[in-house]
Image: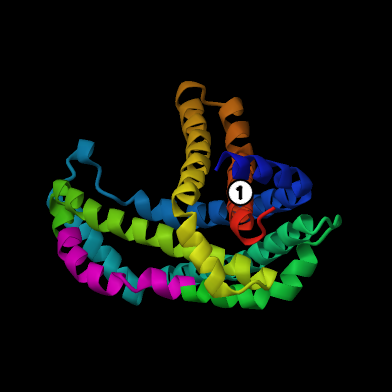
Amino acid sequence: MKRAITRGWHSMKEQFYILILLFIYRLFWSYFMYKFIKDAVISVLLRYPDQNAGGSAIGRLLYYIEGQLALGNDPDVRRWLWMLLLLSAVRLLVSPFIRAGLLHELHQERKGERGLFFFPGMRRYGLPVLLFSVAEWVLSVLPLYWLLPRMYGLLLNGILDYQMLFKLVPYILAWLIYLFFIRKLLLYMLFGYTAGTGILSSLLVCLRVLLPSVGVSVVMGAGGLAVLLICGLSAIFSPGLPAFLLKQLSPLPTILFKMWGTAAQYHLWCSKTFPQ
């Protein structure tokens, strides 16, 4: 595991230009989401009953009923929902092409090649990786067919009693663990497909290195969580321009840990697929 993380860091240095490109992409995405939240969400949240001003459970219930009526009758609400759906669809469609470019870059680095392989990788493997992503999305929402009916009653009761929402935690936690392993299996299958070594063999490699693979994910996840904690604490204890600048730069280390984690998983896969 340690060797995979170290080699993943060396790969990160070779792909520094991808890190900068993804950081700029995240900045544009954050800007559009900021405009959406400012224009559509904040105005709705301001109508939420204030408990300090005498807001009651009945007031909150009327707020939710008004929201349900607006979803079906208010054209402005539907317009904002369609815009959010469009932005989310664009994000979902772009992400597989980014992953395809990153994987192609890793393969070329393993072969000893040097150059800008990110965009050729997007053209070459973008559509196949998109199909893998579609399979991932389908498998991700499949358990919700059984979970949502059990969660729906708890959500309705949680409107009047927030303590009921704690009963949702086991369901959400089980779903997140399921998502974690589905994404890991499909990632290793992508390694095999884009490298031409076979999907099934890469799936077997994933099962063989499952424990160190989970360890790499925990280490990288801890790094990303540390970034979020630093940003949150800076906003609490040092609000103002420093916290604002740190918040704007926070996507950079977040992307770094994600790319580093993918590169480390790749080298873990290589250690079993191309043993030296």
Task: Say which element carries label 1.
Answer: helix
Q: Residue at x 79, y 59 (%)?
A: 111
Q: How many neighbours does mark 1 have within 10 angstroms: few (below 14), some (14-19), or many (20 or more)?
A: many
State left or right for residue 98 relative to residue 157.
right
40 or 104: nearer the viewer: 104
Give the image location of residue 20, x and y in percent. 74, 47
Q: Check disc 1 and report the residue beneath it.
A: 264
Q: Is residue 229 left or right of residue 262?
A: left
**What residue is rendered at 62% in x and 55% in y?**
266
Residue 236 location, quadrant: top left
- Residue 33: x and y, percent? 55, 55
* Residue 169 is inside the magenta segment: no
Q: Amino acid at mark 1?
A: Ala
Viewer-nearest residue: 249 or 100:
100
Q: How many marks?
A: 1
Left or right position of 262 against 49: right
Q: Tell me where residue 45 appears, x and y as whole percent.
A: 36, 51
Residue 138 magenta-highlighted:
yes
* 272 to the left or right of 109: left
Q: Residue at x 64, y 38 (%)?
A: 249
**Whole-percent x and y of residue 237?**
47, 21
Q: Which one is nearer the viewer's eye here, 243 or 256?
A: 256
Residue 229 visible, this orientation: yes
Q: Nearer the viewer, residue 229 or 204?
A: 204
Q: Is residue 184 visible?
A: no
252 in relation to 134, above or below: above
Q: How is the image coloured?
A: rainbow
Would you identify the image quadrant in which residue 270 lies? bottom right
Q: Is residue 192 above or below residue 62?
A: below
In which quadrant will I find the N terminus? top right
Q: Which stretch did the figure color magenta?
A: 136-156
